[in-house]
Image (cartoon, rainbow, N blue to C red):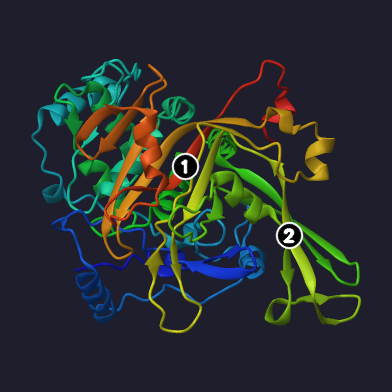
């Protein structure tokens, strides 16, 4: 049994999130995705046995502990070439240093004979590259939604691919990628993603295999057939996509699509204020462990993330005026928001004491269909640029949900189709139409550990008729 997901190198480092006045470390790399296990109603005694077995299999954290301030100090902007390879620091893009050039394709590893693959093969022969216009009109629901075959521990990859595929802002950029001038590289993520989306558009069976894309990930030294954390894997795939597009303008557009700009400030008790800008791909939000019937929602999580935090004792900052460490207050302010807002609910945590076991927080986190960010602190830079909060309105687009335990579990995704504005649930190859009431069942707070709980929330920005170009993000 393989329950560890360090994500190669430092990509599996834990993330430390401030929750009120106490700190909890989320288990980065323990998002789970092993659907090869028989789903059982596990009693408390069996659960304890599983946790002991997990210890025997060396299920330890992937890196040393760190505070929020330390993590952001190490975080660099998208353009930085000096950042160490870690996807843990507040949603930062994974350093390209972690990846080596792709190895040659092994033809013995690409045997394919399904009807959908043959159809995609015909598409490939048109001018040598896929040329599908992606109309999203095929399959059972006539909106382009098809299932993805589970090839073994690939539910996390499948869920993320569906979230990319059903985001028109993302695919409209990817479709403009001119592949005709490129030599076909089996290790090229943009090509593999385009090819897979072509297969999904041409599918007549309602299900395709992502085998070619999975093989492409392996060529980029990403371990595929193992448990993954959805947030971490999102960063890995997105970073590879940016590295391999080789189209500067498209790279900028893709980054702006998900890039969240924040201003971090540290105010020493002597009055000295230090300000630093950071670019994130997601906001890691705390999840409060509540008792039965406790109320905690997404707005509460956002407020806790942006509430100033006191830095005392071991967390004191160095004051240049006094040349020594002094108590301070640390906080964040928004500078600009993206088209697609990625909110990561930190449901995996471990006690601060050494040797503590990672656990999942199953508490309820209610989230709305429509989200307004006008209550969050805004930087003066944003105000000066005319990026007013009256334009920061979002509508829920997708929910990546996790069921199971920190060591193994299963991912599915709920997506609101842009074609018919209806909600759909994609559980690997199974696709079904659902209601908003079904989506709300992922809030959490259930007794069963195998009930789905929301882990990643993707909100799509609502365009305002009076919105200016500067308000759409810098």
- Relative side of 23 to 440, left or right: right
Query: Is any atom of residue 165 visible in this view?
Result: no
The label shown at residue 76 is none
Of residue 292 and residue 186, the one placed in the foreground of this image is 292
Of residue 185 and residue 435, the one placed in the foreground of this image is 435
Give the class, few, some or many, for how many residues have Cα within 10 Å of label 2's Cα (few <14, many ≥20). some
The label shown at residue 457 is 1
Q: Residue 127 at what x, y percent from top left? A: 29, 21
Q: Residue 14 at what x, y percent from top left? A: 48, 68
Lower sequence index among marks 1 and 2: 2
Q: Which residue position holds label 2?
A: 308
Q: CA distance from mark 1 to mark 2?
A: 24 Å
- Relative side of 54 to 240, left or right: left
Q: Residue 418 at what x, y percent from top left? A: 42, 21
Label 1: state its secondary structure. Answer: strand
Q: Is residue 352 above or below residue 143?
A: below
Identify which residue is drawn at 65% across, 50% down: 303
- Relative side of 353 to 332, left or right: left
Q: Residue 100 at what x, y percent from top left? A: 39, 59
Which part of the image, by quadrant, shows the C terminus?
top right
Identify which residue is drawn at 21% across, 20% down: 140
Identify which residue is drawn at 53% across, 36% down: 254
In which quarter of the view is residue 211 placed? top left
- Relative side of 102 to 242, left or right: left
């Amino acid at each position: 049994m393989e329950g560890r997901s360090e994500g190669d190198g430092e990509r599996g480092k834990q993330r430390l999130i401030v929750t009120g006045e106490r700190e909890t470390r989320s288990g980065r790399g323990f998002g789970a995705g092993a659907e090869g296990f028989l789903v059982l109603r596990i009693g408390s005694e069996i659960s304890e046995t599983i946790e002991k077995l997990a210890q025997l299999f060396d299920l330890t954290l992937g890196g040393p502990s760190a505070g929020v301030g330390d993590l952001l100090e190490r975080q660099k902007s998208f353009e930085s070439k000096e950042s160490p390879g870690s996807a843990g620091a507040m949603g930062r893009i994974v350093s390209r240093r972690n990846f080596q050039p792709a190895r040659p394709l092994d033809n013995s590893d690409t045997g394919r004979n399904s009807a959908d693959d043959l159809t995609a093969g015909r598409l490939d022969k048109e001018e040598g590259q896929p040329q599908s216009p992606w109309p999203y009109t095929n399959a059972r629901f006539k909106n382009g939604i098809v299932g993805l075959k589970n090839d073994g521990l690939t539910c996390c990859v499948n869920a993320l691919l569906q979230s990319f595929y059903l985001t028109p802002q993302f695919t409209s950029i990817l479709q403009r990628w001119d592949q005709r001038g490129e030599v076909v590289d089996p290790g090229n993520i943009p090509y593999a993603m385009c090819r897979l989306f072509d297969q999904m558009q041409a599918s007549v069976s309602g299900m395709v295999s992502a085998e070619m894309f999975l093989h492409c990930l392996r060529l980029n030294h990403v371990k595929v057939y193992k448990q993954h954390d959805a947030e971490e894997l999102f960063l890995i795939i997105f970073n590879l996509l940016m590295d391999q597009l080789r189209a500067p303008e498209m790279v900028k557009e893709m980054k702006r699509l998900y890039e969240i700009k924040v201003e971090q400030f540290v105010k020493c008790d002597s009055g000295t204020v230090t300000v630093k800008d950071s670019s994130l791909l997601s906001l890691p939000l705390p999840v409060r462990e509540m008792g039965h019937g406790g109320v905690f929602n997404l707005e509460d999580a956002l407020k806790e993330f942006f509430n100033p935090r006191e830095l005392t004792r071991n967390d004191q900052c160095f004051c240049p005026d006094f040349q020594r460490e002094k108590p301070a207050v640390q906080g964040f302010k928004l500078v600009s928001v993206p088209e697609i807002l990625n909110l990561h609910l930190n449901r995996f945590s471990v006690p601060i004491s050494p040797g503590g076991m990672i656990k999942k927080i199953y508490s309820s986190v209610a989230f709305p269909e429509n989200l307004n960010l006008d209550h969050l602190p805004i930087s003066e830079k944003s105000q000066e640029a005319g990026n007013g909060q009256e334009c920061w309105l979002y509508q829920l687009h997708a929910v990546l949900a996790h069921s199971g335990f920190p060591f193994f579990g299963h991912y599915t995704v709920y997506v609101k189709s842009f074609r018919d504005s209806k909600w759909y649930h994609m559980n690997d190859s199974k696709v079904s139409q659902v209601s908003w009431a079904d989506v709300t069942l992922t809030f959490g707070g259930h007794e069963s550990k195998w009930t789905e709980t929301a882990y990643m929330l993707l909100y799509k920005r609502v365009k305002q008729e009076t919105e200016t170009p500067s308000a759409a993000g810098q």
